[in-house]
Image (cartoon, rainbow, N blue to C red):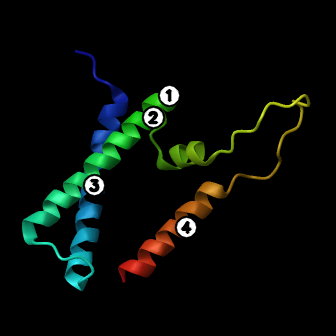
Amino acid sequence: MKRDHIVEEELWRSIPVYFVSFLAIGVLGYTGYVRIGGISTFVLAFIVTAIHFTLMVRYRKKEYLTDPSLSSVMDHMLKRQKPERKNTGYTELRPNLRPVLTMMIIAYLVFRYAV
């Protein structure tokens, strides 16, 4: 039986995603932003993890991404697809900082509204 390495990598990655989503939902429930019971926190964290797992596996298989690092996946997702031009010798010399900026904004928003 041949194992799919993308599914296996995302399955291992979903373990920390489960714990982070469990903690985030627990903090939201503890502070009063969300009214959920004890067992509902486990179920909701599992649902968030299953959605993350499914989306990442589909995206990586669709785009044939074999590098499992989050930075390469984010860089590929946020890369601007340039239309084909007659001048193919043009290359952009600036580094692509869009994925880093996007992750910083998301982290700030999560920190701002979770605390």
Q: Secondary structure at mark 2?
A: helix
Numbered mark located on residue 101 in the image: none
- The residue tagged 1 is 64
- The residue tagged 2 is 60
Name the kind of residue labelled 2 in the image: Arg
Q: CA distance from mark 3 to mark 2?
A: 18 Å
Quarter of the rendering containing residue 88: top right
Foreground mark, 3 or 1?
Answer: 3
Percent x, y of residue 111: 43, 77
Answer with left or right where residue 68 lies relative to residue 28. right
Percent x, y of residue 69: 47, 44
Q: Residue at x 28, y 55 (%)?
A: 48
Numbered mark located on residue 104 in the image: 4
Percent x, y of residue 104: 55, 67
- The residue tagged 3 is 48
Q: Residue at x 26, y 47 (%)?
A: 50
Upstream in sequence: badge 3 or badge 1: 3
Q: Secondary structure at mark 3?
A: helix
Where the C terminus falls, by quadrant?
Answer: bottom left
Q: Residue at x 69, y 39 (%)?
A: 81
Mark 2 in CB contact with mark 1 (< 8 angstroms): yes
Q: Secondary structure at mark 4?
A: helix
Upstream in sequence: badge 3 or badge 2: 3
Q: Residue at x 60, y 55 (%)?
A: 99
Asked if one can make out residue 13 in the rendered structure from this viewpoint, the answer is no
Answer with left or right where residue 13 lies relative to residue 95. left
Quarter of the rendering containing residue 25: bottom left
